[in-house]
Amino acid sequence: MTDFSGKVAIVTGGSQNIGLAIARKFSDAGARVIVADLYPPDEEDLEFIKTDISDEEDVRVLMETIRDDFGHLDVLINNAGICLEVPIHKMSVAQWDKTMNVNAKGVFLMTKHAFDLLKAAENSAIVNISSIEALGANPTHAAYAASKGAVSSFTHNTALEYGPYGIRCNAIAPGWINTPFNEAFLDQYPDRAKVDAEIKALHPVGRLGQPEDIGDVA
């Protein structure tokens, strides 16, 4: 395991699911982990700063706190995201905007305001959590897929613009991950066993991914 002792990491949406698995991995490796989320995690070794990543003032305050407490930032994990399952012809502008504000605008704001702190560190990195739906899609996930496509494209630009400052930027595009969020989605189908078999068949390894898999990659 890589030693992250003395390193500072922010994980947005780090209170649950994939974000929590990522936060745990970095904490286990010795990093000082700050969870930026609307609700605190249960883990006592993870620091929490309540943050609405779609609100620029919230993000600015978060970064000012990191600057005052640590002076630099080594790792930014842009993980927070939401998915509203609505057919395109029934989707409201408010539902579209909410998805875009969290999934795409939030990544932009965090990246923008983390720049000076990341530049102050050596060999710093940004990891954006995109999705396989940036490349394909599921029915009723139009806003989610579009937002994750934006994250993937934004990752390319960030890598190009921030690379000269010693800041790397990459994206992870998970497929189906075994989280409570996905469990709730799959539970809506009457023949759950059939759906589970079909979902597993989509994956070459023959199983759904686990949050820890994404934590390891991050």
Image (tube, rainbow, N blue to C red):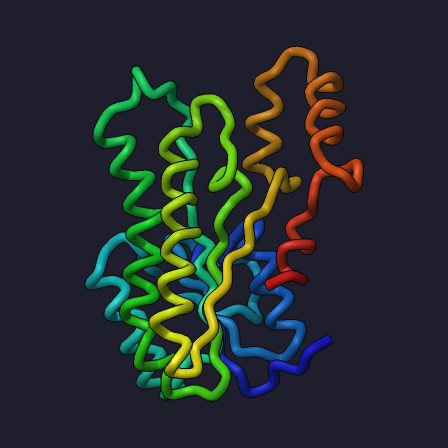
Q: Is residue 177 above or below residue 76?
A: above
> Is residue 10 among the parts visible in the rendering?
no
Report whether 39 appears left or right of 104. right
Query: For residue 5, which quarter of the picture?
Result: bottom right
Q: Residue furthest top?
A: 190
* Percent position of residue 107, x then y: 35, 57
- 97 vs 183, nearest the viewer: 97
Give the residue drawn at x 69%, y 20%: 195
* Percent position of residue 162, x then y: 37, 74
Q: Residue furthest right?
A: 206
Give the residue drawn at x 61%, y 81%: 4
Q: Is residue 31 above or below residue 198?
A: below
* Percent position of residue 193, x then y: 75, 19
* Percent position of residue 76, x then y: 45, 69
> Is residue 110 among the parts visible in the rendering?
yes
Query: For residue 118, which quarter of the picture?
Result: bottom left
Give the residue drawn at x 72%, y 25%: 196
- 158 vs 11, nearest the viewer: 158
- 180 vs 99, nearest the viewer: 99
Q: State which quarter of the image contains the C terminus.
A: bottom right
Total tally of numbered discs in the picture: 0
Query: For residue 185, which quarter of the picture?
Result: top right
Give the residue drawn at x 47%, y 73%: 168
Q: Is residue 166 above or below residue 34?
A: below
Q: Is residue 20 above or below residue 209?
A: below
- 108 vs 59, nearest the viewer: 108
Q: State which quarter of the image contains the N terminus.
A: bottom right
